[in-house]
Image: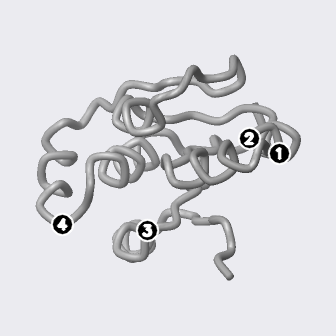
């Protein structure tokens, strides 16, 4: 694992898998963490370098679900629990919430 945990939402995984380039994430980061909600959203079999990590603060997840989807909520909470980290998060509202919480963000550029 690199110096910081890399935690991904499903949109990045789905986009890269759809063009046959999911392994780019492994080349860049070696390993990725995802919460259970992202595993459910992704739906496919995961390669061994993507690890599922259970979110501990279910109460905070429920609070974030008032404004975000399950994947975004769990990624943000997992980011607060696994520090230092960088979140791969493309959802605009999710990025705003994560930024307000001081989390480091990256994403896939959109055309």
Residue found 57% across the figure and 47% down from its top: 14
The one of 109 and 1 positioned closer to us in this rendering = 109
Classify residue 51 by image quadrant.
Answer: top right
Relative to 90, residue 61 above or below: above
Q: Nearer the viewer, mark 2 or mark 3?
A: 2
Mark 4 element type: loop
Residue found 13% across the figure and 47% down from its top: 62
Mark 2 vs 1: CB contact within 8 A: yes
| Residue on which the image places disc 2 | 22
| Residue on which the image places disc 3 | 91
Mark 2 element type: loop
Q: Residues within 10 Å of mark 3 (few under 14, many from 20)?
A: some
What is the C-alpha distance between the residues marked 2 and 3?
19 Å
What is the C-alpha distance between the residues marked 2 and 4?
28 Å
| Residue on which the image places disc 1 | 24
Q: Spot the residue most to the right.
A: 27
Relative to 94, residue 69 above or below: above
Q: Spot the residue most to the bottom.
A: 111
Classify residue 81 by image quadrant.
Answer: top left
Q: Residues within 10 Å of mark 1 (few under 14, many from 20)?
A: few
What is the C-alpha distance between the residues marked 4 and 1?
31 Å
| Residue on which the image places disc 4 | 67
Residue found 68% across the figure and 22% down from its top: 47
Position of residue 109 measured from the top left corner of the image (x, y, whole percent): 68, 74
């Amino acid at each position: 694992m690199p110096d910081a945990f890399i935690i991904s939402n499903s949109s990045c995984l789905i986009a890269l898998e759809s063009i046959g380039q999911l392994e780019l994430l492994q080349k860049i980061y070696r390993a990725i963490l995802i919460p259970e909600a992202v595993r459910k959203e992704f739906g496919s079999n995961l390669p061994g370098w993507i690890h599922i990590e259970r979110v501990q603060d279910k109460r905070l997840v429920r609070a974030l679900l008032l404004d975000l989807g399950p994947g975004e909520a769990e990624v943000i909470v997992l980011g607060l629990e696994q520090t230092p980290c960088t979140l791969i998060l493309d959802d605009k509202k999710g990025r705003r919430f994560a930024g307000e919480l001081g989390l480091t963000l990256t994403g896939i550029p959109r055309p």
